[in-house]
Amino acid sequence: MSSTDAPVLIVGGSLVGLSTALFLAHHGVRATLVERHPSTSVHPRAVGYYPRTAELLAQAGVAAAAERAAAGFERHRTRAGVVSLAGEVLFSREELEGADELAGLTPHRLLLLPQDRLEPLLRARAEELGADLRFGTELLSFDETPDGVTAVLGSDGGPSTVRSQWLVACDGPRSTVREALKVPRHGRGVLSRHVSIAFRADLAAALGERRYSVVHVKNPQVTGILVHDDTLTEGTLIVGWSPEEGEGLADFTDERCRELVSAAIGDPGVEVTIRSRFPWDMAEQVAEGFRHGRVLLAGDAAHVIPPTGGYGANTGIADARDLAWKLALVVRGQAGPALLDSYDAERRPVGEHTAAQGSLQLAVRSGSATEEQRAQVQDALTVTMGQSYRSAAVVAEDGAEPLPVASDPRALGGRPGTRAPYLATAGADGPAGTLGLFGRGFVLLTGEGGAAWAAAAAGVAERLGIGLTAHRIGAEPAGPEGGFGPAYGIGPAGAVLVRPDGFVAWRAVGAAPDGDPDGALERVLRRVLAR
């Protein structure tokens, strides 16, 4: 039996697993990923990615390719209810209304791209950066010890073993890793069961000039949700099924699926070819702990989020980003293992909150929501971009009231534990503005009078052996708050420490009170790095 070593073993090669491998490779860590399927997804599955996710993809060099691939979906911004594509329209509204007003918040926009098109881009970039991706390879068992994990793998080439320092489970809602660890989950559980039917059909005549992001179909023959691609020749129809009543996937024959799709199109003359079927559960379930020794859970293995709102894939990719920079520092010995405790402290509350938001949106769209529930629903930008972390990797300000898990991103003002505000500053590279400064190591932003902080950064970086760059930002950058200082909540002599994931770790409103910026900055970084 062959044996190899890897700093990190990732189980599951879908969106979240590929993102984890990509972000680790971006930080110079060559992880090994195993996926039992022979290739990336052949099913469209997730479709929409919010601006914050596009920011994360940009950090790893994928956003430009994804935007090119998504160009054909630019007009697919309408959510509608119809009797059929060719029939009566019952309601229609634009997704992310007011997107043109995002200029002061982010340079990115909602990205529509089916999962089966995004995954190959993630795979290609991860492999380009050196990730070891093994498709057609299944995790058979694993054994955790205090100093690592030994996994037994199976493939056509026979069994093999991988010895890794850390294992990341990205193996979906039925995670074999989570089940082996016997990690309980809480939440509302399974809410309903569905089958996604991927098909080919010429939809041009039925759609005309209309382009939909999501279509809710309801007629006597079929009730479901339909999405179509930019070529107007492929789509997915999601319908309910009842395995608890004896219905099986085998009952969804090609003939039955064609009948359902044809009824959703509303034109019996359109030829329909069935590509695949994919059963899944709509559920609200969150694991009671995202770190278990040397095993970490991410994506659906950690939290299952009702798809209403499209938060599942976005939350999983954000998990991967939060986890990757921390794992990279721990693997290289630049941070203590306790840094990984902050992954659970930061991402589990987000998973719980986002899953609850998905359930609330489901209740609203089904018409069963109470007035109290309606009042609790947050908009997508708040849920995905307005998150607040409380952990040892964030140095909270003395006397500051804790922020809620998610709030209006425009009102966060550079608070520690929140996404660093975007400014279109000439001091950064191109339209990415200040966001273009983040993504590798730590970044220290200072005001015009922050020369002492900036000078301290080089010495601290050398002593701690970490990546830390300093940037003095002038008062002129355009922003919703009137410039760098107000946007980040500091004065001209202040400083802000931004983590590799673009979240604020700490800030000083002005100069170091004891006249020792070098010592103050080193103490902060040692605390964040669990050293």
Image (cartoon, grey):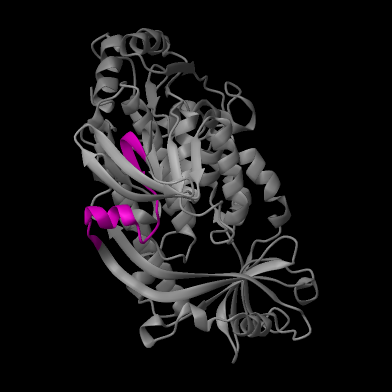
Range drawn in magenta: 161-185
Does any portion of residue 411 appear in the rendered image? no
Question: Residue 381 appears at what percent x and percent y?
Answer: 48, 52
Which quadrant would residue 345 be assigned to in this image? top left
Residue at 43% over, 71% down? 362
Quadrant the C terminus occupies: top left
Does any portion of residue 189 appear in the rendered image? yes
Q: Nearer the viewer, residue 222 or 416?
A: 222
Against 335, is 262 above or below? below
The residue at the far bottom in this view is 220
Against 467, is 194 above or below? below
Q: Nearer the viewer, residue 180 or 365?
A: 180
Which quadrant would residue 462 be assigned to in this image? top left
Left or right: residue 347 versus residue 91 is left
Residue at 49% over, 60% down? 310
Residue at 54% over, 59% down? 46
